Image: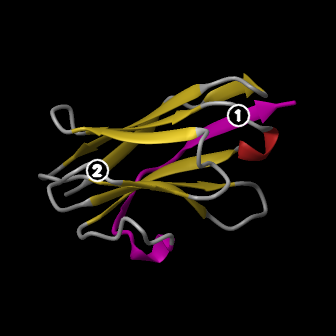
């Protein structure tokens, strides 16, 4: 079955950068959409970014556009989230997700089929 394992979280200061990685396994991801979501304490899980595995088309939430970059490495079956100019409000658990169809412009977490366990990102002011 599909497995997603996130890594790269940590504690950083405002303005710093951090790179998250998601190792995907269990099948070919051609035709899939990969996404990153985050959940801050006391808040609902929210969409961050997504990428169409086949051609690398990307989509971002307004809150991270211009600061975060999602990418995929088809040879290694990994999806990365490069986060620059981090802000305290970016503090959250970040989750990698996969959907077995093209939903790259969809921001609803209910549309995704598989989830990782998450990695904590804490940004201090």
Circle number at residue 86 = 1
Q: Nearer the viewer, residue 41 or 17?
A: 17
On whether residue 38 falls in the magenta region, the answer is no
Q: Position of residue 44 (x, y in %)?
A: 68, 68
Tell me what residue is drawn at x 59 percent, y 49 percent: 65
The quarter of the image holding the N terminus is bottom left
Q: Position of residue 78 (x, y in %)?
A: 29, 37
Q: Position of residue 35 (x, y in %)?
A: 42, 56
On whether residue 123 falls in the magenta region, the answer is yes
As drawn, the residue found furthest toward the front would be 66
Circle number at residue 3 = 2
Q: Nearer the viewer, residue 96 or 81?
A: 81
* CA distance for labels 2 and 1: 28 Å
Tell me what residue is drawn at x 52 percent, y 47 percent: 118
As drawn, the residue found furthest toward the right would be 125
Nearer-N-terminus badge (2/1): 2
Circle number at residue 31 = none
Q: Which residues are magenta?
A: 108-125
Label 2 or label 1, whichever lies nearer to me, is 1
Helix, strand or loop at label 2? It is: strand
Q: Position of residue 99 (x, y in %)?
A: 30, 66
Tell me what residue is drawn at x 40 percent, y 75 percent: 111
Instruction: Tell me if label 2 and label 1 are in contact, CB under 8 Å.
Output: no
Snapshot colouring: secondary structure
Residue 74, by quadrant, is top left
Mark 2 closeness class: few <14, some 14–19, many ≥20 residues within 10 Å: some
Mark 1 closeness class: few <14, some 14–19, many ≥20 residues within 10 Å: many
Tell me what residue is drawn at x 33 percent, y 69 percent: 113
């Amino acid at each position: 079955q599909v497995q997603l394992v996130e890594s790269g979280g940590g504690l950083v200061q405002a303005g710093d950068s951090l790179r998250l990685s998601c190792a995907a396994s269990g099948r070919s991801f051609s035709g899939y959409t990969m996404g990153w979501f985050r959940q801050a304490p006391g808040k609902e899980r929210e969409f961050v970014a997504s990428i169409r595995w086949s051609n690398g088309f990307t989509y971002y939430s307004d809150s991270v556009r211009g600061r975060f970059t999602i990418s995929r490495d088809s040879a290694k079956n990994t999806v990365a989230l490069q986060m620059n100019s981090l802000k305290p409000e970016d503090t959250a658990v970040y989750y990698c997700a996969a959907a077995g169809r093209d939903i790259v412009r969809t921001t609803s977490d209910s549309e995704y089929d598989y989830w990782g366990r998450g990695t904590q990102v804490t940004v201090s002011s």
